[in-house]
Amino acid sequence: MSTQENTNGKAVIDINNIKLAQANSYNNLIKNNAAWVERKLAEDSEFFTTLAKGQSPEVLWIGCSDSRVPANEVTGTKPGEVFVHRNIANVCVHSDMNMLSVLDYAVNVLKVKHVIVAGHYGCGGVAAAMSNKQFGLIDNWLRHIKDVYRLHAKELDAIADEADRVKRLVELNVSEQVYNLCKTTIIQNAWKERHDLEVHGWVIDLASGLVKDQQVTSSSPHNLGYVYEFATEEVAAH
């Protein structure tokens, strides 16, 4: 027990037990790392030597920070095969320099062929964005998802079941974030030079583990609308 009552009936926190549990939790991470290294070396004695030489992933994964949706586990890929960026509710906005820096490096240096926005059902960030509660600093981030709701309010308000409404907003959020990525100068300039870059939208069903392709794959800027597509000779003549 980490708490007990004193003679006045007030709870007394057992600091020693708390610190012991904390130390055990941390030390388990170290032990698990050593065990993982041992397993990998048993499978391939050159695994880490090869890994240290560099990476050549074909995929950039922009996913949710939720601990239940790790990119390599979901896709069955190995270290070095997926470049990963994660944030709450897999949001992609033009003012996020962190995400843009990752995108730029992945597209222009690593030359990835697929950019995947990966949302998931049961996303706490999406559910929080649908409420009127204040949660703190994160409210400013969740506003981007509220904007998605506003864009699709007619469809979403027509869904009576709240759980189904949240699931649909998860899907719409993924689609809108794919659209946001395609509007960036990074993706559009890459499309001028390359024909092997695609942006995809996925939703992961935690109940089954399966991925649902949202069928919003883009490989050119031509469906963005005139105001978003940066000028080429074809656009300039519009």
Image: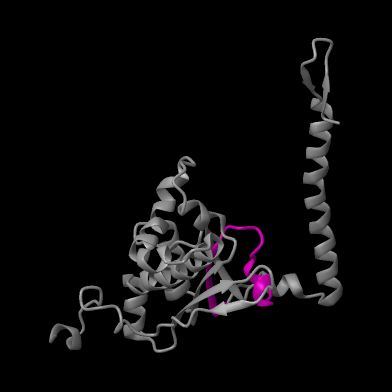
Q: Residue furthest top?
A: 8
Residue 123, visible in the rendered structure: yes
Q: Picture coordinates of residue 80 (x, y %)? A: 63, 73
Of 32 and 138, which appears nearest the observer?
138
**Which residue appears farthest toward the left when viewing the image?**
237
In the displayed structure, would residue 152 be above or below residue 146? below
Image quadrant assignment for residue 56: bottom right
Of 116 and 209, which appears nearest the observer? 209
Taking the spot 48% from the left edge, 72% from the top edge, the residue there is 106
| Rendered position, 6 above or below 42 | above
User: Residue 45 magenta-drawn?
Assistant: no
- At a point 43% along the width and 72% down the height, the residue shown is 175
**Which quarter of the figure is the N terminus placed in?**
top right
- Please name the residue shown 61% across and 72% down the image: 54
Q: Is residue 112 visible?
A: no
Q: Is residue 62 magenta?
A: yes
Picture coordinates of residue 230, whole percent (x, y):
23, 76
Which residue range is magenta in the image? 57-78
Closer-to-camera residue (169/183): 169
Q: Quadrant of the C terminus?
A: bottom left
What's the image's color scheme?
one colour
What number of labels is visible?
A: 0
58 with respect to 15 (left or right): left
The answer to whether residue 72 is left or right of residue 137 is: right
Q: Position of residue 236 (x, y in %)?
A: 14, 83
Q: Is residue 29 left or right of residue 195?
A: right
Residue 7 percent location from the top left of the image: 84, 10
